Image (cartoon, helix red, strand yellow):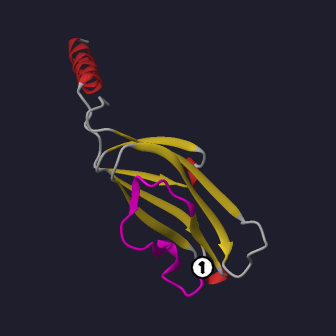
Amino acid sequence: MKVLHIIVGSLFLTLLAACVSPQQPSAQERLNADHNSQSITLSLGQTLTISLPGNPGTGFQWEITRMPPFLAQEGTPEFRPDDSSGQRVGAGGLTVWHMKANAPGSGALDFAYRRAWEKEVPPAKTIHYEIRVRPSSEPE
């Protein structure tokens, strides 16, 4: 019985220490389609990675329709085929963007999933994120 009390006490102290330890912001935040319509706060200089599912073999592609001026896209979007597809031609996967928070501000980041040649057709899907970048002097 004494051993059980020691184990439970140790576990409790470990969990308590984890709760009160200061959390450092991760250098990178990640968003995907499950985060649609959600808000995220970034620190100045932090990287945001966005991964959206799609299948460019069908002609549909994600495009950014609105991006706040305080975010800068790093490189070009990259398509990553699903691991289970064995990189088959026409298989779906994820389109991945990397953005850097270059200045404080807040605004919308919007994406549309559509075929480029179907200008008059509404997008098949849309994604919306509210992004805020806090000034470096603002506490977290």
Q: Give x and y (percent) for residue 41.
A: 42, 40
Mark 1 secondary-structure assignment? helix
Could you tell me residue 124's position as x and y percent? 72, 66
Q: What residue lies at 30% left-to-right and 31% top-to-bottom?
A: 138
Classify 65 as above or below 10.
below
Residue 131 visible from this viewpoint: no
The magenta segment is: 65-91
Q: Label 1 amino acid? A: Pro
Observer-nearest of 102 and 62: 102
Residue 31 placement, left or right of 33: left
**The residue positioned farthest toward the bottom in the image shown:** 89
Q: Disc 1 designates what residue?
A: 56
Locate residue 89: give its quadrant.
Answer: bottom right
Above or below 20: residue 119 = below
Report the side of 21 relative to 36 (left or right).
left
Q: Is residue 52 visible?
A: yes
The C terminus: image quadrant: top left
- Nearer to us in this view, 42 or 106: 106
Does the magenta segment cover residue 81? yes
Q: In screen coordinates, is 7 left or right of 66? A: left
The residue closer to the viewer here, 26 or 110, is 110
Vertical placement of residue 83 versus 57, above or below: above
Percent x, y for residue 86? 48, 81
Magenta stretch containing residue 90, yes or no?
yes
* Quadrant location of the N terminus in the rendered image: top left
Foreground of the two, 13 or 34:
34
Q: Residue at x 66, y 79 (%)?
A: 116
